[in-house]
Amino acid sequence: MMSLSLKRLPLWPFYLALLLLYPLLVYPEESLFRLTDISMGMQLTYIFIYAILALGLNVVVGYTGLLHLGIAAFFGIGAYITGILTVPAYPFQLGFLAALVLSTAGAAILGVLLGAPTLRLRGDYLAIVTLGFGEVTRFTLRNLEEITAGTRGLNPVPAPTLPAVLVGPLGWLGIQPDWSLDYRLFYYLALGLLLLVIVVLTNLERSRLGRAWVAIREDELAATCMGINAARVKLSAFALGCGLAGMAGCLYATTLTSTAGPDAFDFNRSMIMLCCVILGGLGSLRGTLLGVFLLIGFDNVAAPILDGLIQSAGIGASGNSLLTFSNWKLMIFGLALVLMMRFRPEGLLPSQQVAGELDPNQSPRLAAGGTRR
């Protein structure tokens, strides 16, 4: 009985405690991570930002079933709105909180403007429209040099202003109150916003709106016959998903101290986020987070570390590109996706509905073990 009760204990408090304590217990970072001059803490910060972006895409693709291939465009829109509102080259020079709100709202409004005339489209046609919007956005950001600085991007994006009441407690924890010297400030900012997004989406899943999203995904005609306004529900999903992408873009530009160039928000970025959602499980909040940690962690953390180990061992000293792990990572990633689609198409941590559709054998196990989110 004791072992059965322990198996049912949720693991998320352990993972949360680990993420909260890691910067305090491992600082400065040494040994393995220094082989490639990367900071594990900064890489985790970017993973948190991409997790917010992927959760926004999961609202549109996973919950509502709308294939969106232009989420990186709204990521870039959020970053550039932040740059325009904060960099010294413009007269606005707003604070981080105002830029965060306006970037989120601006991306959400543009999402509605894109979704309103196109939501009658379905499947591949909607995907093509969103893909085209993403490319149009990227080239627009590149060509409006007088506003966006073209390929150079807007910089420097200033760091947030640290409230005076936090300086003392941060000093007790050994955290320097300087954003440029201590990555842990950005780390906890990104983690805090990610936790806020998770709480909001968890409550939305159980709300009337969340159930309407799933109903539209399962059978739009039946949902409409039950009194659900399909257009309004889809627009709400577009607005929320694009708004979260804008929030992630604001956080990305602030952490990077630059908007980066327009090519940082290309189609490849959208596809990587879509792969994170599919890998973890469509419509699953936990699955999306797992997909981001596995995929982005593999690309940003595991690959550089393995390259550093190979170089330190002298294996790649000859300059042979075949002896560099980074040249193999895309092939390994592609092979993993092929195997996933073949043997576990519902993802690693799928939602109950998606698991039942893609793998009917999963339904009895999910019913016995409870609802999987």
Image (cartoon, helix red, strand yellow):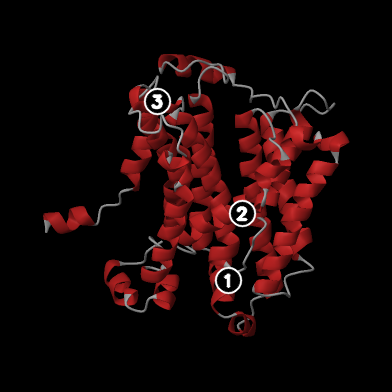
The residue depicted at 62 percent of the width and 84 percent of the height is 221
Q: Closer to the camera, 306 or 257?
A: 306
Percent position (x, y) of residue 227?
A: 64, 80
Numbered mark located on residue 35 in the image: 3
**Location of residue 216 by image quarter:** bottom right
- Residue 282 appearing in the image: yes
| Sooner in the amino-acid sequence: mark 1 or mark 2 | 1
Q: Is residue 307 left or right of residue 83?
A: left
Numbered mark located on residue 117 in the image: none
Percent position (x, y) of residue 281?
A: 44, 62
- Kindly report the distance in space between the C-alpha atoms of the residues bearing marks 3 and 1: 49 Å
The residue type indicated by label 2 comes to Ser
Instruction: For the C terminus, give its image quadrant.
Output: bottom left
Residue bearing the label numbered 2 = 270
> Is 141 drawn above or below residue 21 in the view shown?
below
Whether pointer 3 and pointer 2 mark residues with C-beta atoms closer than 8 Å, the reply is no
Q: Closer to the camera, 205 or 328?
A: 328
Numbered mark located on residue 212 in the image: 1
The residue type indicated by label 1 comes to Ala
- Residue 192 appearing in the image: no
The residue depicted at 60 percent of the width and 30 percent of the height is 255
- Secondary structure under the numbered disc 1 in the rendered image: helix
Which dot, 3 or 2, sits closer to the camera? 3
- Kindly report the distance in space between the C-alpha atoms of the residues bearing marks 3 and 2: 30 Å
Whether pointer 1 and pointer 2 mark residues with C-beta atoms closer than 8 Å, the reply is no
